[in-house]
Image (tube, helix red, strand yellow):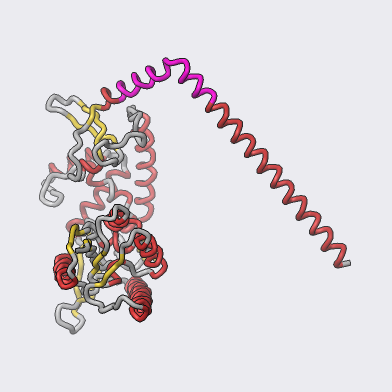
Amino acid sequence: MNNAVIYPRQSSHGQGDQTIETQIQICQEYAERKGLRVVKVFDGDKKKSASKDTEKRKDLHKMIEAAETGTFQYIIVYELNRFMRNRAESVLFKAQLAKHGVKVLSAVEDIRDDEGGELYEMIVEWRDEKYSRDLSRRVRHGLDTSVANGTFCGGYLIYGYQIRKEPTGKPDRFIKYVEIDEEQAKIVRYVFKRYADGLSKERIAEVLNKMGDRYKGRLFKGRDFDRWLTNKKYTGEFCFGNRKCDNMFPQIIDRATFDKAQKLLQKNKYFAKSNVVREPFLLSSKLYCGYCGTPMVADGGVGHMGVTYKYYACKDTKKGNCAKNRESKEALEKWVADEIIKFLSDPRRLNKMVDDVVAYHGKKTDESETKSIESKIVHAKKQIDDTINSLIAR
């Protein structure tokens, strides 16, 4: 019995695709009918951002790498467009899989394993790519229309605004407009004015809390204002993608006050940096987890007594995907330094390193001189050709 894996994926446009769970069920039923044993389900590419950009589809690349082991012979997808909508990418990935004897199968599209089936598969892929292009064009056109009309395009609605819905005449269908939430806008105006007057964000939060104001049901904190003070939407201007919008968000803050706040932010940022001593993590970008191979990154925490602890932690451990414990920054860096000193204490190793560095430098110098000479030759040939062409023209 041949082995197979299942690769389900949600659409980036959300045009009524089957859910991930339903796709898996249909693919499993297809495998049973074909007498295939399912050995794994690569269902990690659930985010819509992952379906738009192939590079972000981590489970796709894990599956391609797993194909090299020869542990399965088929990849089952709900439809071929779940594997790839771009024909060029589809051809490249399928060719890579074919080298390892792996073929992509569609659970709901009847594609025969002959020349006619190959032709039909090409037509299906062409249709899916064309559909994707047309859909993207319609989405862009809809956004352009929304921006031109000043209607809300979706996304996160910042503090100070609320949505007004106007019925379209169709059930549960509304046109959305952004309008000012006066109660919240009053606080936004106060924050900008006091900050422009020179009051710190922490002090502004303290005053608001004493006045009984709350942010999402809790006390204000100085960092709550970080995004407020840099958000141009409060001036009535912002960019939606590459589209400049000036009629979607009503103005809450005048431009002069906003610009004054920006200058103070830059000034305060500069002085804050000058007073902070940042301890470097010497092994950053050089350290990898021994469990899963993922880069180790800077991490830390504060103990009960206010003591700061610094660590190197596996990125996948922080996501809950690896069992590697954190390593003490100080202890690990000392151990690496000791090992380096021990390594360089051997005169033979030290001399070998010196010879390698000198040889590498000589090679780079030779290459640089060669490229310079080649460039001069090309330039001289061009001058000769130009001269000859000029003489012929006369």
Residue visible at 43% across and 16% down in the picture: 346
| Looking at the image, residue 95 lies above or below residue 316 | below
Residue visible at 18% across and 41% down in the picture: 207
Can residue 153 be seen in this snapshot?
A: no
Q: Is residue 214 magenta?
A: no
Residue 119 x %, y %: 37, 79
Classify the position of the C terminus by image quarter.
Answer: bottom right
- Choose between 159 and 372: the one closer to the eye: 372
- Choose between 19 and 196: the one closer to the eye: 19
Q: Which residues are magenta?
A: 333-355
Can residue 67 be seen in this snapshot?
A: yes
Q: Is 314 on the left-hand or right-hand side of 362?
A: left
| Looking at the image, residue 157 lies above or below residue 258 | below
| Quarter-of-image position of residue 59 | bottom left
- Prevalent SS, magenta region: helix
| Quarter-of-image position of residue 122 | bottom left
